[in-house]
Amino acid sequence: MSIRIIFLGTAGAIPTAQRSLPAVLLQRGNEQLMFDCGEAVQRQMIRAKTGFHKKLKIFLTHMHGDHVLGLPGLLQTMALMDRQKPVEVYGPVGTAHFLACLQESLQFGLTYPVEIHEVTNAGLVCNEEEYTITAEHTNHGVTSFAYAFVEKPRPGKFHPEKAKALGIRQGQAWSQLQHGETLTLKDGKTVKPEDVSGPQRKGRKIVYTGDTRPFKAFAEFAADADLVIHEATFDDALIEKAELDGHSTPSQAAEEAKSAGAKSLVLTHISARYSEPQLLLGQAKKVFANTQVAEDFLELELPLGE
Amino acid sequence: MSIRIIFLGTAGAIPTAQRSLPAVLLQRGNEQLMFDCGEAVQRQMIRAKTGFHKKLKIFLTHMHGDHVLGLPGLLQTMALMDRQKPVEVYGPVGTAHFLACLQESLQFGLTYPVEIHEVTNAGLVCNEEEYTITAEHTNHGVTSFAYAFVEKPRPGKFHPEKAKALGIRQGQAWSQLQHGETLTLKDGKTVKPEDVSGPQRKGRKIVYTGDTRPFKAFAEFAADADLVIHEATFDDALIEKAELDGHSTPSQAAEEAKSAGAKSLVLTHISARYSEPQLLLGQAKKVFANTQVAEDFLELELPLGE
């Protein structure tokens, strides 16, 4: 199952003609996971043709307007489109109050349930059949979480010749072994999946930081990530301003990705002062070569590993 | 002083790739009056290069999300840009609560005062030196106001030859007469502005409906308007849906403009189902010829009348 990452908004706190406010959509099969939900995300979704009826979880990093003000309009539009599936919203304490007071002020009805899960601690946030989401505190001045999407390992590659050698014929038995079940043969012998398969295959890992200064727990939290999506609001020359405002520079983001042993890095949450990405890109690449600077509607494909 | 109308958002309740959510900006000299404040209006302002530091009044027609969800982000961005001038916000009861709960949820600080004026009745909403804004109840299902911008009459055209004939020399005395003051000459005679000027010149009148079915008070409220900006969410074939949802069709909007004796009509709040304006335009033009369908960033200039 391939994973597609769509950058719906890549601006810092103020949008520009080129960049909408922060939102990153992870599409995995028919499921969508959205990280942050900046103003106008619904229109960005229309432009990117992502649809409004898929299984959807939304993860808010923190309760600053530029990261959450797209949520009420998105929820309303999905209701106008007669969405039926629930939407799960994860965010720091305050998420429920934010939505409750908007719903009270604007009196909007929904056609589907919104399930709010407030994240109070670092650690496991949700545990699905095929993946987990964990959170880690970032360093931004208000309570703010980075999120890691981690696929559970898949069974190793199935070797038909080994199954045949054990006298197991193609059919249901193969399928059971491929799905991790242990078989008992007619002669009483048992065959375990690992008897006919290669080693377990690691799932993919994607980390989204939200807003943050560099922080100590990052290296472990993002260890071996396939993709780190890190904020880089200001360029290296503004490192003091970044520190003051709770943000990172490209070199800092790159150091974080490097310390985690990540495979690739995308910089986002780019201040309106940078109309071109070259300056930021150059600073990051000196530290971590496999870097790119996000732009709105950038799409990345993360194929299933072997 | 010329008036420029900029359509920042022309969508109905759901935006499209072409249309952002409702907002119309009236620029008169260095002052801006915004009617409705749909999600993403701040980015539309950036695209239209309207600036964020001018004198600004915002008029909300009603508390539905598609008409107001651009306000918190706009206020925050103006604070990030260190705006100093106050912003005046006019809207129905609930406007203050809406902003208070957002400010509490998102903890945003402002660098300038926001003065909230809740409109409780039809009639005069604000009375400025050179214009007034009045409100009228529309027919939409929730409390909703249309707004009329009406310039006060300007003094008549000054006739230098009449002044000279009365022995008044060019200079300060002319300026005083042009600004409506009565002069007392050395010989004790008085000269009134009307002695040296033509008749008073009518100011311009612009009416913005917000969301509404046709309503009885409209003809008088919009009487002789230079420009009526009327919603036309659905085409004539969907008149029953329009009635049900509290909206108008192009023919209805055109009948309203005609009944008011308006000079021109612009249709806005266009449902996402219409990718081209021709259908709506044709239906309206049969009733009221001087009609156009708004699109995002349409700009109209209303020159100063003679």
Image: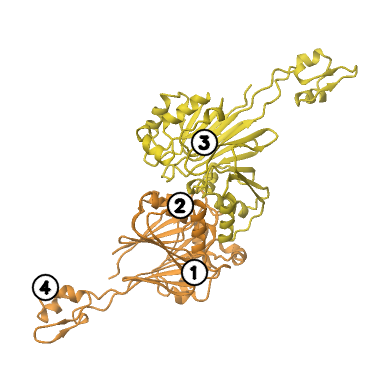
Chain colours: A orange, B yellow
As shown in the figure, which amino acid type bears the numbered disc 2? Phe
Q: Secondary structure at mark 1?
A: strand
- Camera-nearest residue between A50 and A70: A70
The residue sitting at 49% across, 59% down in the picture is: A99
The mark lying in front, picked from 3 and 4, is: 3
Which chain hosts label 2?
Answer: A
Q: Secondary structure at mark 2?
A: loop
Classify residue B203 as left or right of residue A38: right
The residue sitting at 59% across, 62% down in the picture is: A237
Give the CA separation, mark 1 to mark 2. Answer: 29 Å
Mark 3 crowdedness (10 Å alpha carbons): few <14, some 14-19, many ≥20: many
Image coords of residue B51 (percent x, y): 60, 44
Image coords of residue B141 (percent x, y): 47, 42
Mark 4 crowdedness (10 Å alpha carbons): few <14, some 14-19, many ≥20: few
Which chain hosts label 4?
Answer: A
Query: What numbered label is drawn on residue A108?
Result: 2
As shown in the figure, which amino acid type bears the numbered disc 1? Phe
The reply to whether the C-beta atoms of the residues labelled 2 and 3 are less than 8 Å apart is no
Are marks 1 and 2 in one subunit? yes
According to the picture, the residue beneath numbered tag 1 turns out to be A145
Give the CA separation, mark 2 to mark 3. Answer: 21 Å
According to the picture, the residue beneath numbered tag 3 turns out to be B209
- Nearest to N terminus: mark 1 or mark 2: 2
The mark lying in front, picked from 2 and 3, is: 2
Which chain hosts label 1?
Answer: A
Q: Secondary structure at mark 4?
A: loop
